[in-house]
Image (spheres, grey):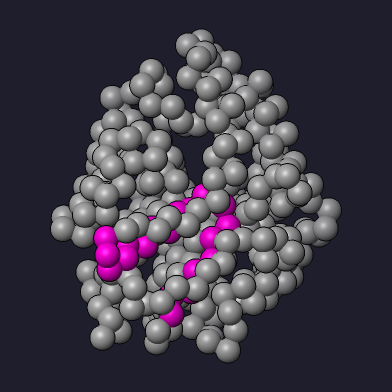
Amino acid sequence: MKIKNYQSVTQTYKEHNEDRFGASNYGFWVIDGALPLSHAHHTDSCSDVVWMVTWWNDYLGKYLDDFNRTIVEIMEEGVDQINQEFNRFYDVDKLTKLDRASASIAIVRLNDSTLETLVLGDVEVNLETCNGDIITIVDDSMSEMDNQVINMIFDNPERSGQVVFNGYTHEELEILRYNRMTMNEPGGYTVLEHDRAAIKNGIYKCLSLSDLKSVLIMSDGYSAVYNKYELMSQEVLMTTWKTQSLEIPLNIIRQAESEDLDFNTYKRLRKHDDATAVGFEIVYK
C-alpha cells in the first residue's frame, strides 16, 4: 500500500484560523474548532479554542502512529492529557458547557490492510471505493441543531444592526447556547472537548484498504460546496480535487459567499467559515 496525490488546503477570513489539519507517517486528520459561547478565556493563546486545536494537532502528530492502541484509546488518553495541561490555567471541572472550547474532528489511520477512522462532529470523511461508490462518514446532529439559527439569519434582513456577541443576535445566541448545553449529553450531539467519555460515542469504523481508492477529509466550511450550497455534486467534488486541486472547490465556495454577503442565497451561520480539507489516493497491491 502507498499514498499518492496527497493534498491539503485551509483558509480563514478571521485573524486566527480555528481549523487545523495534519499528517503523520500513517495518519491524517482535520480539526474544526468552536469558540466558547461565553466570554471565557483562560489559556495563554489568543483564544481557548486556538489553544485547544493547536494542542490536539501537536498531540496527534506525536502519538497517532502508535498501533498498539486504537484511535479511540489514543484520543481518550489525549483528553486526560489536555485536561491536565488546561488545569495549569484554570480548573477544567469548573467550566460550564458554555465556557468550553470544543471541536469537530475526523481522523484516518492506515495500517497494512485496514483503514481506521474516528469522527466526532461534522468534519466529514468521504471514502471512494474501487467500484466508484462514495462512503460518507459524518455526524450530522450538530448541523441539524444549527439549522434553526441559520433560518433566523436568512429570514432577518435587519440583523446586521442587532448583533451582540461573536456575530450573532441575542435571539440567535439564545438558541446556540441552548444547543451547546446538549453537548455530549443524551439526545444532544457528540464532539471533542474536555469529556473523556465522549470519545467512545464518536463514529468509529475499520474498512479494508483493498476496497478503497481515495480519501477526502473536510471541515463543514469546505464540504458546504456540495452539501449546503449545492455548487457541485459529491461525485464531481471527488473528481475535481483529484484531477485538479483542492483549491478549486474552495475558490468556488469563496466566490459564492462573496457574492452573497447579505445571506440572500446561501443559508449559513456566518459570511465565511474556516474551510479545510485533506485528500489522498490509495494504491493497494
Q: Determine the residue located farthest toward the left in the rendered image.
A: 243
Point out the residue furthest to the top here.
158
Query: Would residue 253 be found to the left or right of residue 248 on screen?
Result: right
Q: Is residue 3 above or below residue 85?
A: below
The range drawn in magenta is 114-132
Position of 79 relative to 16 (above/below): below
Assess whether residue 118 is covered by the magenta stretch: yes
Q: Is residue 111 left or right of residue 144?
A: left
Q: Is residue 194 visible?
A: yes
Q: Residue 6 is drawn in which quadrant?
A: bottom left
- Residue under the image location 26 percent in, 33 percent down: 255
Q: Looking at the image, which is closer to me, 187 or 175?
A: 187
Give the percent coordinates (x, y) of residue 61: 48, 76
Q: Quadrant of the C terminus?
A: bottom left
Q: Position of residue 156 (x, y in %)?
A: 52, 13
**Residue 210, placed above or below residue 17:** below
Q: Residue at x 62, y 73 (%)?
A: 72
Q: Residue at x 38, y 46 (%)?
A: 223
Q: Residue at x 61, y 22 (%)?
A: 169
Q: Where is residue 68, by image quadrant? A: bottom right
Predominant SS along the magenta part: strand
Give the percent coordinates (x, y) of residue 50: 55, 54
On the rendered structure, is 250 left or right of 116? left
User: Does the magenta run of residues contain 252?
Assistant: no
**In the depicted structure, whether residue 166 falls above or below residue 161:** below
**Rendered location of residue 102, percent (x, y):** 63, 52
